[in-house]
Amino acid sequence: MGYIQTEIIVVDAVYPAPAVIERAANLLREGEIVVFPTETVYGLGAGAFQPAALERIFAAKGRPFSDPLIVHIADRHDLVQLTTSIPEQANRLAQAFWPGPLTLILPKGPRVPHLVTAGLETVAIRMPRHHVALALIRALGSPIAAPSANRFMHVSPTTAQHAYTDLAGRVPLVLDAGPCDIGVESTVLDLCSETPRILRPGGVSLEALRSVLPPGQLLTHYAPTVPLVLFDDTVETMRSAMLAEIQRRSEQGEHVGVLLAEEDIPTFQDSGVLLYSPGSADDLKQVAANLFAGLRTLEEAHVQVILCRNFGDQGLGLAIRDRLLKAAGGKVYG
Ligand code: TXA
Ligand code: MG
């Protein structure tokens, strides 16, 4: 991609100058991308219904097309063009938290481009609590799709300067309204699963969501409903630590499940606990494909704890590790 001159324009966070907003909206109308502030982190926006502009987002960030984008709206009526149905819970949550740092996953409407949803049948939507973001969406007259305005795998930008550092030469305009209030990304809540599930913790807390959802109606991100302990060490050390932990817990009468690799099975087959192998540690594609199924299988067998080996951090290993760390909620051994 060619080098683009990047301009930073300072804009008042509460009373953004209409001429500046109009300038940014015109760029979006022309199919350009623009960095703009939200209350969580800076976003890299494109018109949500403009596939060519959406492609530019992925190119500028170096982000794979497999990662879907959040659509930002300024008015609840905008939901109609984005979704096929609005569950009652979505209305209650929107009433309580919009505008604000809550992203809802809803069934995707037919007009939403596949580039936004990464081919999924669902779409992520939020209404940001920031005058500049809202003014920009209104001036464009259409929702804005935007990921955080950082290069892929880098931390999210909470100042215009952060975004500039990552994206200079790749975007024509950065709107600078000062540091973001919240500083962490929005909470992503999936309303398309049977029970609402937090896919990413963020600006709206678990407690706050619980106060709006019916009692018991919330699952946290990838966490299985039973506790998971991740064993993070070289294969031999990890195996002996897991065996020791199995013995300790079994002696206490705990029903233990173990998520291991195929090649670990001989070490564990006589330990008298429930084993699940998603595949060989040499075949991470298979491990990834079976990972969540494995957690669910152990969960459904009513184990009280899942002891889990690590699968390294090469290739897909990093994604597997990320999901296991989330499931472990910080309980890492080794
Ligand atoms: O606070 C925020 O959410 C910021 C500001 C700019 O709004 N945006 C942001 O976007 O953090 P991004 O793209 O960096 O993160 C969006 C997250 C990703 O983890 C993505 O996988 C998830 O939302 N997501 C988007 N669409 C989804 C969908 N249909 N189903 C499940 N997850 C989805
Ligand atoms: Mg991001």
Image: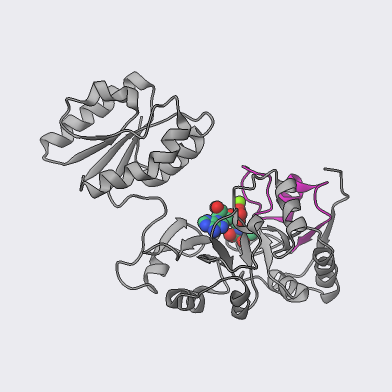
Judge whether residue 230 is colored magenta: no
- Please indicate whether residue 142 sits to the left or right of residue 223 in the image: right
x 73%, y 52%: residue = 55
Q: How is the image coloured?
A: one colour
Task: Give how far across and how far down residue 33 sits, in percent.
Answer: 78, 58
Residue visible at 32% across and 21% down in the picture: 237
Span colored in magenta: 148-176
Residue 220 makes an appearance in the image: yes
Q: Nearer the viewer, residue 284 or 36?
A: 284
14 shown above or below 40: below
The image quarter in which residue 140 lies: bottom right
Q: Residue at x 68, y 48 (%)?
A: 150
Q: Height in image: 318 above or below 186?
A: above
Q: In which quadrant will I find the N terminus?
A: top right
Asked if 136 appears above or below 246 in the picture, the reply is: below
> Percent position (x, y) of residue 194?
37, 64
| Residue at the extreme top of the image, as rendered | 236
Q: Position of residue 44 (x, y in %)?
A: 71, 57
Q: Which of the two residues, 51 or 216, is positioned nearer the viewer here?
A: 51
| Image quarter of the C terminus | top left
Report x, y in % for residue 79. Answer: 59, 75
Tell me if residue 161 is in the magenta stretch.
Answer: yes
Asked if residue 195 is positioned above or below residue 64 in the image, the reply reads below
In the image, is 277 to the left or to the right of 174? left
